[in-house]
Amino acid sequence: MTLDRAQFSRRGFLGLGVAAGVITLTACGSGSGSSDGPLVMTVWGGETDRATYQKRIDLLVKKYPELKVKLQLIPSESYAQKVQTMIAGGNGPDIMQVAENVNVYSSKNQLRPLDDLAKSAGLDLTQRFGTIGSLYSYEDKLYAIPDRSGAMIVYYNKTLFEKKGIKAPTADWTWDDTLDAFKELTEKGKTWGYGGAGWWPQWWSMAYQNGGAIIDADGKPTADSDEVVEALQWVGDLIFKHGVVPTKAQYADMGTDVGGDQAFAAGTVAVNATGFWAIAGQAESKFEWDIAPMWRGKKQAVASFGSGLAISRTAKNPDNAFKAIDFLTSPSAQSQIIAAAEDVPANLEVQKSEAFLKPAWMKSDVNMGVFAESSEFLFKAPFIPEWNEMLAAIDTATADFWLGKERSAKKALTALQKNLESIIKSAG
Amino acid sequence: MAMSRLRRREALWFYVFVSPWVIGFLAFLLGPMVSSIYFSMTDWDSFTPPKWVGLDNYTKLLTEDPVFWKALGNTLFYSAVSVPLGLLVGLWLANLLNKQVRARKLFRTLIYLPTLVPLVAASLAFRVVLAPSGPLNDVLGWVGIKGPQWLLDPSWVKYALILLSLWGAGSATVLLLAAMKGIPRELYEAAEIDGAGPVRQFWSITVPQLTPVIFFNLVMGLIGAFQVFSQVYILMPKASQPGTYNASQTMVPYLFDQAFSYYHMGYASAISWLLFAVILVFTLLAFRTTRRWVFYETEVK
């Protein structure tokens, strides 16, 4: 309502009145369900996601006919706001998809800790999901069950690599090997060796490879440590010192909203580190390509993308909700995720299954084993309650760095450290 | 007797016609407005019960929050440049359209057309136009100017926003043009007989006669400019261009982030009331000056 407050032209008043009326009416219409009403499950994404979640729910209902699940798909951009409104209005979802922001909710007492439910269901998280089983645990409590999870992987343009006589990238490539390859692959103004590492999972991977962390194990910010500074400087130098990564201006000239993913698909950058989702876009590619695990620094480390399923505090029947989650993350339901080319299923058994390694829809020969291989060295990002503010602080502090206006990573990260210290209260 | 019945009926119709607004206002606006005053004095994340903190949010905003001051500065700058500029361009276009030229109606339509394009669509189009090697910089290149990186360089994004605000100058133009048409011919004839040239006529007749419409546009423009939101959100998408988004941070996007990204509802409510105060002050200032420059015909004795 605060936003409404700010728009106070007369036409705005009327428009808002109508909008508020519609919201109120629909809220009343949906009513509050009783304990045997359907479980409301909120997820974000597009049509593929809707179809895939629905398929999995159909399997669930087939197995447990007494369960009813109502799927609500919300566009990603408005997911957080919509869920926030639902909860604030006393009509929160029973099962909700969460990701890096999981503890934004848990710290505000909105998620039910799942430890007891998991124990009584006999669910062994490490066995089912490997190291990421505890990804959504915070302060010794489990808040979500991993559902989709894939490492960030390295896409490379095989055609270009072969033309330059460079061997395929491996997990054993050091930073120096990597830089050499990027230099070889770059043709000034035409192609670039690498898509860049301006997004947090990308440059954080370098920081963790170098033995650093943005937030340490005790929850204290350590963004200005020597390890992080060195990693960010290496990433920045790729753009402005070595010219093997397009600058922001060069990207902007390639078209609206072109980043590493699109430039790789267009053949403009030879290597790109991103998630599973780019595979679908590559299916019709004009050049040969493949994927590889992330290269290494002093040690191996790579970011993971994914989401989990949580049960909200207001869920009327948490036992049923957990039963649903337990089934949705079991092999039979999880194999739908890869069958629809939606994402990487978090269930390790499925990640190692033939259905995942050789999906029916895959036209070219892609080394899907990379995901299982990478799962051994995923780093656990700090999903702190102040996650959204932390990302905003990072954006602010590194803005000039990514533009090349501030070439020193040390300066950018010193500023970031100061901001993080004021944002993260748990540090004190 | 008949008179009072008529009056009563008229009063009845008044209430009938005004009731949708009154009901809407009471039901959907007064409540939220009053509660937002309360929330602005609490620490509230919208999930757990609010905690009373008194004026802490306001003190923190005014004394400790550098982003608030930056957002306020950006908003003031944007309003101070875009509103007068929009009025000048509107006045200039209206004056051109008032000339007896051929295809006048066609030009009038063309100038109003951009106003009909939804703001979101216009903003998206501007992202292409303002690209580092986009059409605008190409044109600048022809005359030997190296165009700036409008949407990437934090020091230029404000000007990009102002440029986009001119896109909507057509609506002011139409209002000003209508007012120009309403200026009595006799005034010009009399001036001509007295030997006033076109320039003198413009400044001594057209502009004073237009001042009520200019004033209206000024107030509306001020309110709109202080609340600029969609353009900032679309032109500088936070996801792909966080740096420039921060540089161009204005009040309402900042309020939105605090409320819906960081879950600081109380803090966001405080921002909205400070924004309200700022708008109120500037609107009152504008009203204060009216006696000096706004000319209402009815006041002529």
Image: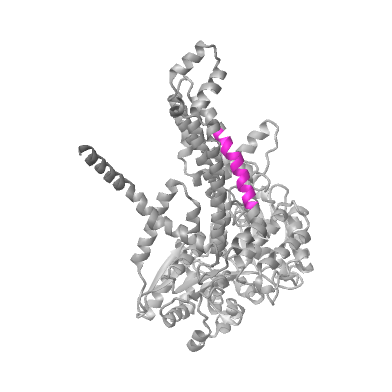
x, y percent for residue A425:
66, 71
Which quarter of the figure is the N terminus of chain B placed in? top left
- Name the magenta segment's main secondary structure: helix
Segment colored magenta: B70-87
Q: Viewer-proximal residue, B205 or A248?
A: B205
Q: Residue furthest front?
A: B1
Question: Is residue A178 visible in the rendered structure shown here?
Answer: no
Number of callouts in the render? 0
Q: Give me the residue at 61% from left, 41% from top.
A: B80
x, y percent for residue B39:
51, 63
Based on the picture, tell me whether residue A347 belongs to the magenta stretch: no
Q: Residue furthest left?
A: B2
Figure check: B279 above or below B297: below
Figure check: B157 above or below B53: above
In the visual, does A342 lie left or right of A20?
right
x, y percent for residue B38:
50, 63
